[in-house]
Image (cartoon, rainbow, N blue to C red):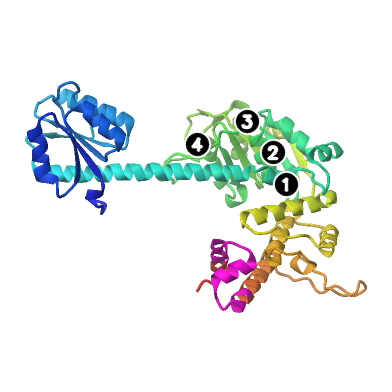
Amino acid sequence: MRDLDWLQHDVLVVDDEEDNLDAFRFAFRKSFRLRYARGGAEALELLAQRPASVVVADQRMPGMSGLELLREAKARDPDTYAILLTAYAELEVLVDAVNSGVVDRYVAKPWDSRELASVLRQGIVSSTTLRDNRRLREQLAAYAAYLEEERRDPLDFGALAPVRQGVSATDARAARPGVLDTIAELASTSEPVLIEGEDGVESELAARAIHVGSAREGRPFVAVSARAFPGERLERELFGWVATESAGFGHERAGRVELANGGTLWVHDPGPFTPALQARLLRLVRDATTERVGETLAREVDVRLVVSVTGSLADAMGDTPLLPELEARLAVCPIRLPPLRERRDEVLGLAQHFLVRQARRNARPVPRLGPAAVEALLAHEWPGNVRELETVVERAALLARGRMIVPEHLQFPTVLPARAPEALPRVPDPRPLDDQLDALERRELVLALEQHRGNKAEVARSLGIHRTTLYYRLKKHGLDG
């Protein structure tokens, strides 16, 4: 039982006989915080003023019975623990009351003080737990709404737009129609969608934009990174399974398709689909039915399938033949996301978008792009596309500490030294880009810690980030000791 202060929780005792209330006062006044009412009407007035964790009501009272009172108290506050005191053998009424949730416990009269004290403590624990859980659910719901608002923020979805400095979104669409118009048109349908593009293009943003722009917006958006489930594991992850001895599964589990019912299922970067998986996907898009692995029961589902591949669908499938009907259905609504090098006029607009987002999320000034940094961004080939641009710009913003971004803050996979144009470039760092950026970030954190003698408040202030962000980054780099 939870360790609670019983005197911090109200117990409302309702009885029309003063002697019975006096018996409660004598037995429990030192152990519980008691309130008293001479009948149901008076009890409801007290509950309107302040809720109670536990309501103890005598069954036989004039005007309003204890059962009627507890039903009304539960209707007003479902977290209230309801105890009915009765000296009458109305078993059928009591069973119905308990089964309907109106009464949590009933105690026969005359009651035993030790037994009733235990029941009161259990009631306080139950009520407190329900209230705590309700607050947590409300908090999580509010946080989920916040995350959804963050994800749907126009600034974030602006990463899809063909943005240019000094050009409005409307003018930009008119100048280069294509992807956004296609997404807008496809969002209103329920057809499966195939997204093709190089690694690092905005495939997830495109998939989410399709979902948000559709009538399914309020339903689940379920993402599956197929690389995490190689071979037959992807089939089980998508469609679930039932417990069978032959399959070796000891429990039953619903698949991602069932979780996405009514919404959108996004499958990212799959390898070759096995024949069995192809057959299941075809039934899903053609018949709107799904079966868990190991069962023959067909379940009706309403799921919009979005598949994104690196390169083309043929590249993703390799030598594995694709069912012609499945291929045809996926090819009905294809979207090709062009690489960033084919839309260099968007680099600065996207970079500014990432700078503003980084600054907003860390409550810091937005750094400016210096002329030399602008030239470096425009000259880079961006083999990692928008994902690489986002990483480079956000790390540069961290290193610039709210000031002007210069080329030294931009860490590309291959960095040219600050030398004369005719000088030879240095040998590229063989480490992956993320490893290089992590090393640079760690070095800057170490320098800041040394400069401010380990004062984390000063370090966070000098870097222009929240202290919680600093603690996270220190722990990430093993500097929190």
Q: Main secondary structure of the magenta part?
A: helix
Mark 3 and mark 2: Cα distance apart in space: 15 Å
Question: Do the residues under discs 3 and 2 have CB atoms within 8 angstroms?
Answer: no
Q: Which mark is residue 159?
A: 1
The magenta-colored residue range is: 448-473
| Front disc: 2 or 1 | 1
Where does the image place residue 301, in percent across and percent down from the top left? 54, 29
Q: Which residue is mark 4?
A: 292
Position above or below: 429 against 310: below
Give the number of the mark in front: 4 or 2: 4
What count of labels does the image hold?
4
CA gap, disc 4 to disc 1?
37 Å
Q: Is residue 455 magenta?
A: yes
Report the side of 42 relative to 60 (left or right).
right
The earlier-in-sequence mark between 3 and 4 is 3
Q: Name the N-terminal-most of marks 2 and 1.
A: 1
- Residue positioned most to the top: 63
Per the image, label 4 sits on a secondary structure element best described as loop
User: Dot 3: what SS?
Assistant: helix
